[in-house]
Image (cartoon, helix red, strand yellow):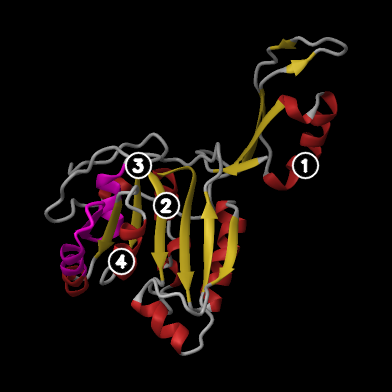
Amino acid sequence: MQRSQQNGRNALFVHVLGCPQRGQGKVFAAGVVMVKIFLDKHRQIVTQLLDLCPVSCFCLFVMSVPAIRPFQPQYLTVPRDFQPIANMAICLEIGAGKGKHACLFAHTHPQYPLLAIERTAEKFHAMQKTHQELGCKNLQPIHADAIPWVVHALYPAQIEQVFILYPNPEPHNPSQRWLNMPFFEYLLSRIKAGGTITLASNIAEYIIEAEQQLTTVWHLPYELQRIAEDSARTHFEVKYLQRGELCQQLIITKPQNYQTRFDNVLPRLGQHA
């Protein structure tokens, strides 16, 4: 079964693609069986269905709207000096700071276009300067708030990799943590199947909460990794590791057939609501 997001209440949708006839090699169209029940009751139904035909005959999707208020992209204003980008595969770094990781990644992965977003003017200008000195043609620094920029610029399934390295833990406003925000569903819609999100933090509680959200809200597979003591992707990472702090990251993968409510929503491209 593949968990994913879709409009409507928590429900189980079982799509029967075809069932081999008993004793024959033929496949006949079985139509579509839709069973709408709350998730805590679906196991018995699935078991009964699978008793009728082999597992390989079914394509199962569990589609549940996340228990979080819906994101409303139509109300986000156009970023200042906004410039559209081409509908091509990219990598994205959110909160790129002074660009240490962005420049390193662009230099070591010249085959990947990387768009590095930073909201703070001082840090953005520092990244821009480093970028100009290194001359990485596949790196594009962007001075903007990430959320409206993503809404106005990115197409569905456009992103190969997302990097969110040592974000603000928002100790007094947990609803603004990335996996707690409705925007996270929209961000998932911009990522291609098989694409990844790398989320790094030096705060154990932040990682633990993110794991819980991935399991209970977003239903996404992930791998928890301890970051090597000699890693130096960002200035924060260098500082934290020198202090002897535990730095960890989650490698989150978007599975095949994962669905969101925004999969068919095109970028606003500078249009106002």
Type of amino acid at the residue the image marks with label 1: Arg
Res 225 visible: yes
Type of amino acid at the residue the image marks with label 2: Gln
Q: Are marks 2 and 1 in contact (CB under 8 Å)?
A: no
Sequence-wise, the earlier of marks 2 and 3 is 3
Q: Quadrant of residue 156?
A: top left
Sequence-wise, the earlier of marks 2 and 1 is 1
The residue wearing badge 1 is 43
Q: Residue furthest left?
A: 81
Q: Which residues are magenta?
A: 127-154
Select label 4 or label 1 by which is in front: 4
Select label 2 or label 1 by which is in front: 2
Q: Residues within 10 Å of mark 3 (few under 14, many from 20)?
A: some
Q: Are marks 4 and 1 in contact (CB under 8 Å)?
A: no
Q: CA distance from mark 2 to mark 1?
A: 34 Å
Q: Position of residue 158 (x, y in %)?
A: 37, 41
Q: Quadrant of residue 176?
A: bottom left
The residue wearing badge 4 is 96
Res 180 visible: no
Element marked by disc 1: helix
* Residue 37 vertical placement versus 204 (above, below): above
Type of amino acid at the residue the image marks with label 3: Ala
Q: CA distance from mark 4 to mark 1?
A: 43 Å
- Residue at the (28%, 59%) spot, across then down: 116
Element marked by disc 2: strand
Disc on res. 89: 3
Instruction: Judge left or right: residue 94 versus residue 179.
Output: left
Q: Quadrant of the N terminus?
A: top right
Element marked by disc 3: loop
Which of 119/185 is in front?
A: 119
Sequence-wise, the earlier of marks 3 and 1 is 1
Which of 131/134 is in front?
A: 134
